[in-house]
Image (cartoon, grey):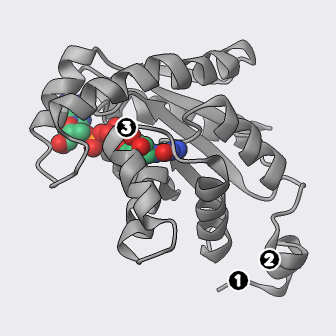
Amino acid sequence: MGTVVDAANKGVNGSLPNEKKFKVVFVLGGPGSGKGTQCANIVEHFGFTHLSAGDLLRAEIKSGSENGTMIQNMIKEGKIVPSEVTVKLLQRAMQESDNDKFLIDGFPRNEENRAAFENVTGIVPEFVLFFDCSEEEMEKRLLSRNQGRDDDNIETIKKRFNVFVESSLPVIEYYGSKGKVQKIDACKPVEEVFAAVKAIFTQVHEKEVVG
Ligand code: ADP
Ligand code: C5P
Ligand code: MG
């Protein structure tokens, strides 16, 4: 349950406060690099709430929202939905949560996403977890994901890889220049990737405790 203090911190008109009440970790990596899989593990061990931008957009399509058709078409083409839409969904999910620690998965996907989120919420991520994986391995994983997704076909996958290189990698480089990127070799088996993830979250937690 949210407390009165929580409500006050969320500010007027439901806007998020500029002060750092929420702790956010961005989880980035190419399509099929294992972001969703590892976020589920992190939630279990470290008490974060997982917000996948892609999942929120797919839920928005299902809800029959007025933006549904536009979102559906963009996902089918592997394109990035306007930030206004995605930031609103993320903001609402954070406001509705009782938690104050979020893994934001698959966002920011481009410079526009990054700037819009920072401007609207005032939140700067604690760090960025970057799952680094070869296209060959990611393609194999996506083609056998079997979740009935419109975009897990070879034609859309190729487009998504291009968008990742052209629009998303520069965002990772931006955070890299600020010393905020924790890069992980995500081509390894799930358990090995999680061992590396766990080491990072444990180290960050210890730093916080020590001050
Ligand atoms: P993302 O969210 O980055 O697109 P997912 O977590 O959905 O990726 O993983 C894509 C597919 O690959 C899923 O079917 C998942 O089970 C599988 N997968 C995830 N991590 C690994 C891994 N380390 N090795 C092999 N397969 C994996
Ligand atoms: O992260 P995920 O693979 O679920 O994203 C699926 C699709 O959702 C992306 O290819 C893109 O079309 C859309 N998306 C977006 N903006 C984001 C995250 C996802 O437009 N920040
Ligand atoms: Mg995912």
- The three-letter code of the residue at mark 2 reads Asp
- The three-letter code of the residue at mark 3 reads Gly
Q: Which residue is mark 3?
A: 78
Residue at screen point 48% across, 41% down = 106
Relative to 210, residue 189 above or below: above
Residue 18 is situated, as x and y percent measured from the top left of the image, at: 89, 55
Residue 146 is situated, as x and y percent measured from the top left of the image, at: 11, 49
Between 201 and 58, the residue placed more toward the observer is 58
**Where the N terminus falls, by quadrant?**
bottom right
Determine the image quadrant of residue 109: top right
Determine the image quadrant of residue 61: bottom left
Q: Which residue is mark 2?
A: 6
Tell me if mark 2 has few (under 14), some (14-19) or many (20+) residues whose alpha carbon lies within 10 angstroms of its own: some
Q: Tag 2, which secondary structure?
A: helix
* Chain-order first, disc 1 or disc 3: 1
Nearest to viewer (mark 1 / mark 3): 3
- The three-letter code of the residue at mark 1 reads Gly
Between 116 and 207, the residue placed more toward the observer is 116
Assess whether mark 1 and mark 2 are in contact (beta carbons under 8 angstroms).
yes
